Image (cartoon, rainbow, N blue to C red):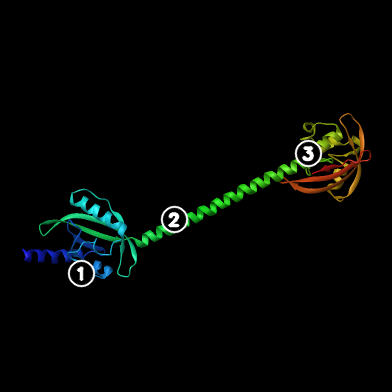
Amino acid sequence: MNAKKHIGKRKARVLLNLLSDLAVLVDEKGRFLVVNDVFEEVTGLNQKELVGKSFLELDIISAESNAVLLENLKKRLQGASVEPYEVYFIDKAGVKRCVEVKGKKVSYAGKPAVLVVFHNITRRKENQQRLKEYAEQIEALVNEKVKEIKENAQKLRESEEKYRTIFEEALDAIVIADAETGIIINCNRAASELVGREKSELIGKHQRILHPPEEIIGDFSRTFKQHLKEKEGQILETKVITKKGEIKDVAIKANIFEFQGKKCFKVYSETSQNRRKLRWR
């Protein structure tokens, strides 16, 4: 009986040594029956120190993993299927390694036993952790960028709202016109009041609508052409005409600037009567 068991042990050890992972045979109480060379190397314990002892008696499995190992050992001995699972293994240097455990119920020396293989996945877990941390960092950066974009968008909305308020409530008349076509893009309430027309009557119309016929040269008003060329930024005297035909003397100062991707005029003009300013933008 002992000879047969000895031969069985030798053959089992030879087979276990074919594996590059830590491999052991344990009985129904979790006591080591056979261990391979890799197991000895990693634990720093030899066959004599291991065989006959339970993994519960040795400090090679972390405390939180002992219960898991024992429970799954019982399941396998009862013929239940157990999926690979993870436990923490402590090597001879005291380093905790994460290992994936796989097992199979076998017969050893005529008695039920379990072949247990421990596959070191510490590096995989470390890489997964690094990837997780990297993903969290990326997510944090993205969230920070999204927050920044939202804050900038809010600031832009507030700035635009502030500009609209200043634009609409300014005492100066302000008109925005395309420098190339002369089409009025926008105007404020003061500009509307200056020429006695609603905004809807001005926006989309040519800037000629603001001047009497004698101030028109070709397709544009005289001052519009002058400001477009050699007299940009200078104050020029001209006239505007109201919807009712009233003529008002004004002094205009104009500059070209970019608005909504177009070249537009910014013109300052004040009447000789009420000192109001008309600004082309």
Q: Give the class, few, some or many, for how many residues have Cα within 10 Å of label 2's Cα (few <14, many ≥20).
A: few
Pointer 2 or 3: first along the chain:
2
Q: Is residue 32 left or right of residue 281?
A: left
In this rendering, is residue 46 above or below 204?
below
Question: Is 94 in front, or is 219?
Answer: 94
Tell me if mark 3 has few (under 14), some (14-19) or many (20+) residues whose alpha carbon lies within 10 angstroms of its own: some
Secondary structure of residue under mark 1: helix
At horizontal 61% and vertical 51% (from top left) the residue drawn is 148
Residue 49's disc is: 1
The answer to which of marks 2 and 1 sits earlier in the sequence is: 1
Residue positioned 9% across, 64% down in the render: 5
Q: Amino acid at mark 2?
A: Lys
- At 85% from the left and 31% from the top, the residue drawn is 196
Badge 1 or badge 3: first in the primary sequence = 1
In the picture, the quarter occupied by the N terminus is: bottom left
44 vs 252: above or below: below
The image shows residue 13 at horizontal and vertical percentages of 17, 66
Which residue in the protein does label 3 denote? 168
Residue 54 at x, y percent in the picture: 21, 61
Occupied quadrant, residue 106: bottom left
The amino acid pointed to by label 3 is Glu
Mark 2, residue position:
132
Question: Do we see residue 183 in this rendering?
Answer: no
Examine the rendered structure and indicate whether residue 237 appears above or below residue 73: above
Q: Is residue 134 left or right of residue 4?
A: right
* Element carrying mark 3: helix
